Amino acid sequence: MSTPPFITTHRVEFFETDLAGIVHFANYYRFMEQAEHAFFRALGLKIHDKLPDGTVFGWPRVTASCSFNAPARYEEEIEIRVTVIRRTKRSLTTAYEFWRGETRLATGEMKTAYCIVPAGGGLQSVDMPDEYFERLGEGLNAVDS
């Protein structure tokens, strides 16, 4: 049985478009990130914060891609569907679908890694906390690794 995707919406602003009023392709990456943050908030999780010892954690991008099917335009409200397609102890891969009514506008995918930055140290990929692993698994739609 498949878990339904997390759904959020975005109204296209003028600054996100070109002179023809069509969303500039680069903004879809921003839309994916905004939807990812909304998804984490809905699960009661943070995308960036400090641990009790002052260590900063976050989810830097490992890969991101987007393919386009139809244009989105100024003032349109688009639906963004977020689905977890792969979760490991150190990474998360999410898929994004952009819809305007019955028209699929674009699809995207993003892989992120759970990382920490200890005080005075560099970025390190580590296992995500159990709470994150469990909650992010609630949206899992594919084989868990």
Image (cartoon, rainbow, N blue to C red):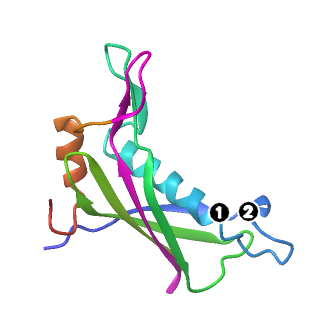
* Residue that carries the numbered disc 1 in the rendered image: 27
Residue at 75%, 70% (x, y): give it: 74
Quarter of the rendering occupied by the N terminus: bottom left
* Residue that carries the numbered disc 2 in the rendered image: 16
Seen from the viewer's position, the closer of residues 97 and 66 is 66
Q: Position of residue 32 (x, y in %)?
A: 51, 60
Quarter holding residue 141: bottom left
Amino acid tagged 1: Asn
* Residue found farthest to the right: 19
Q: Position of residue 47 (x, y in %)?
A: 41, 39
Quarter holding residue 24: bottom right
Magenta part of the protein: which range?
101-124
Q: Where is residue 3 in the image (x, y as percent from the top left)?
A: 22, 67
Seen from the viewer's position, the closer of residues 77 and 62 is 62
Task: Judge whether residue 108 is colored magenta.
Answer: yes
Residue 31 as seen in the image, left or right of residue 123: right
As drawn, 22 above or below 16: below
Quarter of the rendering occupied by the C terminus: bottom left
Q: How far apart are marks 1 and 2 (CA)?
A: 6 Å
Residue at 41%, 16% (x, y): give it: 119
As drawn, 8 above or below 120: below
Which label is found at residue 35?
none
CB contact under 8 Å: marks 1 and 2:
yes
Q: Position of residue 35 (x, y in %)?
A: 48, 56
Residue at 71%, 75% (x, y): give it: 73
Residue 30 as seen in the image, left or right of residue 123: right
Amino acid tagged 2: Glu
Q: What element carries label 1?
A: helix
Seen from the viewer's position, the closer of residues 72 and 54 is 54
Instruction: Say whether disc 1 or disc 2 marks the residue closer to the N-terminus.
Output: 2
